[in-house]
Amino acid sequence: MFSVLKKVGFVIGLFSILVGGFGIANIMFVSVKERTNIIGIQKSLGAKNYFILLQFLIESVVLCLMGGIIGLGMVFGGTALLKAAADIQVVLDMSNIIFGISLSISIGIISGILPAYFAARLDPVEAIRSN
């Protein structure tokens, strides 16, 4: 029973990660679109492409880390409730916590790389002109 539950949980988790990654990418594309003028001004003042790229990548990773930390808090709360309600020993291993945070960072990088690349490649003159 537990092996089937583990497999079903894994599949549901994969779909959740996929949807979350698309959500973060969408947020980042909107963020690039809204800040096109600011990007143009930064580039006209001498900002390098890698600076713009890192700016958006860091934002994407921070968004994913916030989601990962909120999810981790929900898991801690759920395990505490389960321990209190059913007197069941539930162990959340440190390797699982590290895996979850690492996965959040990876999804942030993967989801943010394309919007960050587009932001870094903007022409300063065209970016300032856009509304």
Image: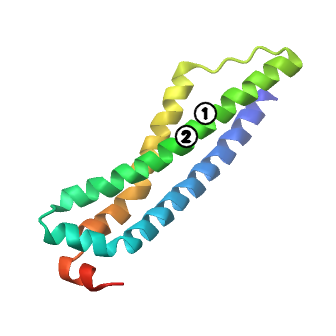
Relative side of 119 to 110, left or right: left
Q: Amino acid at mark 2?
A: Gly
Q: Return the residue nearer the eye: 98 or 47.
A: 47
Q: Return the residue nearer the eye: 22 or 28.
A: 28
- Note whether 127 is above or below 106 in the view shown: below
Query: In which quadrant will I find the C terminus?
Result: bottom left
Q: Which mark is residue 107?
A: none
- Note whether 77 is above or below 130 in the view shown: above
Q: Is the residue marked by circle 2 packed among few (<14), some (14-19), or many (20+) residues within 10 Å?
A: some
Relative side of 45 to 91, left or right: left
Q: Residue at x 39, y 52 (%)?
A: 59
Q: Residue at x 41, y 47 (%)?
A: 61
Element assignment for label 1: helix
Residue at label 1?
72
Between the C-alphas of marks 1 and 2, the distance is 6 Å
Relative side of 50 to 29, left or right: left
Residue at label 2?
68
Image coloring type: rainbow
Q: Determine which quarter of the picture holds residue 50.
A: bottom left
Percent of width and height locating residue 32: 37, 69
Query: In which quadrant will I find the N terminus?
Result: top right
Percent of width and height locating residue 91: 67, 17
Element assignment for label 2: helix
Q: Amino acid at mark 1?
A: Leu
Percent of width and height locating residue 119: 30, 68
Q: Do callouts 1 and 2 mark residues in contact (Cβ within 8 Å)?
A: yes
